[in-house]
């Protein structure tokens, strides 16, 4: 079950997927008792809950009319790979040989993992890890601790991960 809930202090809206006893606002950090949080919308479908949250945020910021003309959030997210230039095109446009760059950066036998991917890996591999465990996993893979914490908070804020009782999981 996914619920769109709001913070009573700062007005932030987020997805709550694992209603433990408490939940922390991803913007201001206030801890709320989940049973007291106002549930603006509930659904078993994560994408539907994300869409409702996005619509609420658009209306809140005065862009409700413009938002209603857009495709749903999942469809727009799916088109992100078609926007901009890919890595090869970028490198070649800068006068570099993309194959040489790939060979120089290939130390693991595969594509290098980005910071976000490493934090997501920590969430996948851990059994509902704490923030400290995620940060430790990431720093062992050359991600600065502050960057790991920021990425973890961003994943929670975007509804891609959840936090309950100090434990995290990828949604």
Image (spheres, rainbow, N blue to C red):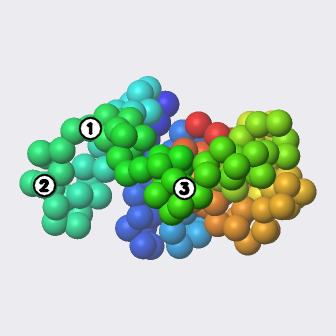
> Who comes first in sequence, dot 1 or dot 2?
2
Q: CA distance from mark 3 to mark 2?
A: 35 Å
Q: Is residue 151 left or right of residue 95?
A: right
Residue 66 at what x, y percent from top left? 13, 55
Q: Is residue 64 above or below residue 107?
A: below
Q: Is residue 148 above or below residue 82?
A: below
Q: Is residue 147 above or below residue 56?
A: below
Residue 146 at what x, y percent from top left? 73, 71
Which residue appears at 61% of the width and 48% of the height? Answer: 98
> Who comes first in sequence, dot 1 or dot 3?
1
Q: Which residue is mark 2?
A: 66
Contact flag, marks 3 and 2 (Cβ < 8 Å): no
Label 3: how many residues lie within 10 Å, few (<14), some (14-19) or many (20+)? Answer: some
Q: Which residue is mark 1?
A: 72
Which structural element holds mark 2?
helix
Which residue appears at 64% of the width and 60% of the height? Answer: 151
Residue 45 at what x, y percent from top left? 41, 27
Q: Is residue 17 above or below residue 134?
A: above
Q: Is residue 45 left or right of residue 144?
A: left
Label 1: how many residues lie within 10 Å, few (<14), some (14-19) or many (20+)? Answer: some
Q: Which residue is mark 3?
A: 91
Q: CA distance from mark 1 to mark 2?
A: 12 Å
> Who comes first in sequence, dot 3 or dot 2?
2
Q: Nearer the viewer, mark 3 or mark 2?
A: 3
Contact flag, marks 1 and 3 (Cβ < 8 Å): no
Contact flag, marks 1 and 2 (Cβ < 8 Å): no
């Amino acid at each position: 079950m996914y619920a769109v809930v709001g913070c009573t202090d700062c007005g932030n809206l987020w997805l709550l997927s694992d209603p433990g006893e408490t939940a922390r606002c991803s913007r201001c950090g206030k801890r709320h008792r989940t049973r007291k949080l106002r549930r603006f919308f509930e659904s078993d479908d994560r994408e539907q809950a994300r869409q409702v949250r996005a619509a609420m945020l658009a209306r809140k910021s005065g862009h409700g009319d413009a938002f209603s003309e857009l495709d749903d959030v999942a469809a727009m997210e799916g088109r992100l790979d078609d926007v901009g230039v890919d890595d090869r095109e970028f490198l070649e446009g800068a006068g570099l040989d993309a194959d040489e760059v790939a060979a120089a950066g290939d130390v693991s036998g595969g594509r290098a993992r980005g910071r976000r991917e490493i934090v997501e890996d920590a969430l996948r591999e851990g059994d509902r890890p704490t923030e400290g465990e995620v940060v430790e996993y990431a720093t062992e893979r050359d991600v600065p601790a502050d960057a790991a914490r920021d990425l973890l908070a961003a994943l929670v804020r975007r509804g891609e991960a959840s936090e309950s009782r100090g434990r995290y999981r990828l949604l």
